[in-house]
Amino acid sequence: MSKSLEILLAALLLATPAVAEPLGLGRPALPEEIAAWDATVLPDGTGLPEGSGDVLTGEDVFGANCASCHGEFAEGLDSWPVLAGGDGTLTDPRPVKTIGSYWPYLSTVYDYVHRSMPFGQAQTLSVDDTYAITAFLLYSNGLVEDDFTLTKDNFATIVMPNAEGFYPDDRAETEYPLFRVEPCMADCRPAPPEVTKRASELNVTPRDGDGKPAGTLPPLTAASETAPAEAEADPAPEAAPAPEAAEPEAEEPETEEPEDHAAADPALIEAGEKVFRKCAACHKVGEGAKHAVGPALNGVVDRAIASAEGFKYSKPLTDLGTGGGIWDSAALHAFLEDPKGFAPGTKMSFAGLKKAEDRDAVIAWLSTFAD
Amino acid sequence: MTDEPKPSRRAFLAGTAAAGAGLVATAATAQTADPLITEVQDWASVFGDPVDATPYGMPIEFESHVVRRNVEWLTESTASSINFTPIHALEGTITPQGCAFERHHSGAITLSKQDYRLMINGLVEKPLIFTFEDLLRFPRQISIAFCECAANGGMEWGGAQLEGCQFTQGMIHNMEYTGVMLRDLLAEAGVKPEGKWVYVEGADASSNGRSIPLEKALDDVMVAFFANGEALRKEHGYPVRLVVPGWEGNMWVKWLRRISVYDQAVESREETSKYTDMMPDGRARKWTWVMDAKSVITQPSPQAPIRHGAGPLVITGLAWSGNGRITRVDISTDGGNSWTPARITGEARSKALTRFHHDMTWDGSEMFIMSRAVDETGYVQPTKQALREIRGTNNVYHNNGIQVWWVRADGEVENVEIA
């Protein structure tokens, strides 16, 4: 072997990411740790735990945990995912991709519901409740009768309607040969271009205050463009206020703060805005807020319970309202700490805010929105 | 319009005359002395910020428009949604973490290095648990890679819809990652011969589990904990995320907590109900992992209109391919009738964003500007129409079609489609 080849081989050996020798790092995973984290269910049913659930139980569990977004019949409220129906729509201009019409494997339903649902409260459903919800979703898609019970043993016998509707990526065969050709460089068009679609006509882009698409770069000659009148009236730049602005001004905001404090604590309100993110999936607040999964919350603090017009409250809340209940601080604290304890049967599927300071903050923030 | 200026001594000398003729509108023609120059400005006289003013610096206030933005109507909840990188305002190839797009399926979680655990289980000889400190003891690698959401451009399948490349192509970022190779972690646990797939999931409530074929897992997949020289940001998976070069962003699992080896794909929700591509016959492609070659002109674009008038104009943009290096980017200013190769500026790295520039003289008349990427496999970025002819308009994902911007005579730019 020549010297240079030897060097080359040695270099290759060094550079090649050959399977490394184990370093002895990490520690063995304990069986109970694996059981806690590995909840995966494979298409053939491998990984399913012992358990079962029937359609009617599933209807109840779904109603309590899922219907606030997905609807009582899994039809999907607002733009939340539709879980049922959609048969035969996959070639439509707007296909309805549901568990029944699209999902190839039932294992995916169980796996996803058990691991990641309900939205915002993942991993709170028991094994049997997950079987029951899965059974109910089969029923709501017309795939089983209402007396059906799903178990670990009959799970693998369920074949989803669209099981054959998928095939592995074939772009390498169907597209690459078409696109791996030397492209035209000159005289490529038979006629001058003609505009067929304009995004501006749809008007669905977020906008800045000046009506331009959000984030539009500001002009780089702003001085002359934004204030031409001023510039013309006073061409001499002597009166430029810059030196004044450079004076230390730190004391001013500090003196203002105590006055503000009496009305509301800005820090608390700000914290409340952050806490409210947990609520924002279902509740809207602020100018023009409309009812969503939950009622709009403008003016909610200190008003009668279940009194927002146009929202269909669940019975327990309506009862509290007709009984004279008011959303004062105490009631809001009790409800937000434990929604289902304060109003058993409420549609609000939210685990609650366990920390008093979180509740204080969110109530302070909501207080800033009048009706 | 005239393309491709050929700078010469003659043209250089003629520059003043051209300005006088009104072809080049710049401040150089101003008659009165500029007070910004003749007057002593405040910043030239008094102190600026002291060194203890900003222990961690943020962009200066004049750049406040350079932020991620979301499109409210896209999703019901901002906890399971996406925002967009302001690519119209950025240059070079590295995306700053602070404005690199985010996609969460259940919000960005707060997970400390101390609380971090990574499990490897399934078809391995030794199921293992690693702490963050353990990961720091494996050999580290550096890799620059683009991360593009499979749905980037998804709103444009039916036609031009959003006004600005931030919204039409902004589900992308490009960072320099430091981490350890997934293959080294797998070697530590020992993959059994029947293991064919690696399933990765996150610690967040969505878990966002995805199956990756073992060949890819052993190739260039990285378990990363630094990006652009500093710790990952929370919204990008702090403390640990997966980097899957060239493949769709959904597989780049954040807050990575478990790696499991199987003999089959898990067929999780994210790889069946989502991230599968509907075809006209009602069936769907699955496992469409690779992001094909694509490019977009970032300036001028609807959010970056031309305000300086006719004369010298810099067109710039980004190109990338999940199948390797970008070898060429062609530019058209006449709606695709004629094409000229742009300059590739800087290095064209495999599976990373590549910057191109095209320096021209604009005569002030309207233009239809387009860019077309070519990668090292010879793949040429197709038109949107060519993609629709194969895939229809319900594909949702993997829209890598050519973008057309309509530059108006006043310099405003629109997102259009042309025939």
Image (cartoon, coloured by chain):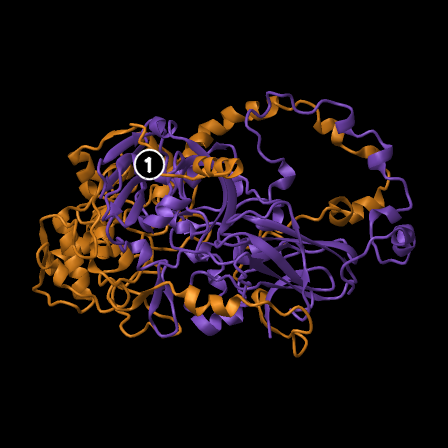
Chain colours: A orange, B purple
Considering depth in this image, is A287 or B65 the residue closer to the camera? Answer: B65
User: Residue A115 versus residue A231: which sits nearer the camera?
Assistant: A115
Query: In the picture shown, does residue A69 fall above or below A93?
Result: above
Give the residue drawn at x 43%, y 56%: B290
- Near-viewer residue (B250 or A149): B250
At label 1, the amino acid type is: Leu
Left or right, A251 with respect to B262, comes to right
Which of A256/A19 is in front? A19
Tally of marks = 1
Chain under callout 1: B
What residue is rendered at 70% in x and 66% in y?
Answer: B367
* Residue in the image at 60% along x and 21% along y: A251
- Would you call the spot at circle 1 few (<14 residues within 10 Å), some (14-19), or many (20 or more)? many
Seen from this angle, which residue lies furthest bottom?
A190
- The residue pinned by badge 1 equals B185
Instruction: Report whether A366 appears left or right of A29.
Output: right
Where's residue A14, x and y in %?
Answer: 45, 35
Point out the residue furthest to the front here. A1
* x and y, in percent, of residue B108 in the image: 39, 41
In the image, residue B130 lies at what x, y percent?
30, 31
Q: Is residue B105 above or below residue A242?
A: below
Q: Note whether B284 is above or below B344 in the view shown.
A: below
Residue B25 location, x and y as percent?
Answer: 83, 53
Task: Classify mark 1: helix, strand or loop.
Answer: helix
B266 sits left or right of A138 in the view: right
Query: Is residue B62 at all visible to an observer of this figure?
Result: yes
Residue B225 shows in the view: no
In this rendering, is residue B303 above or below A34?
below
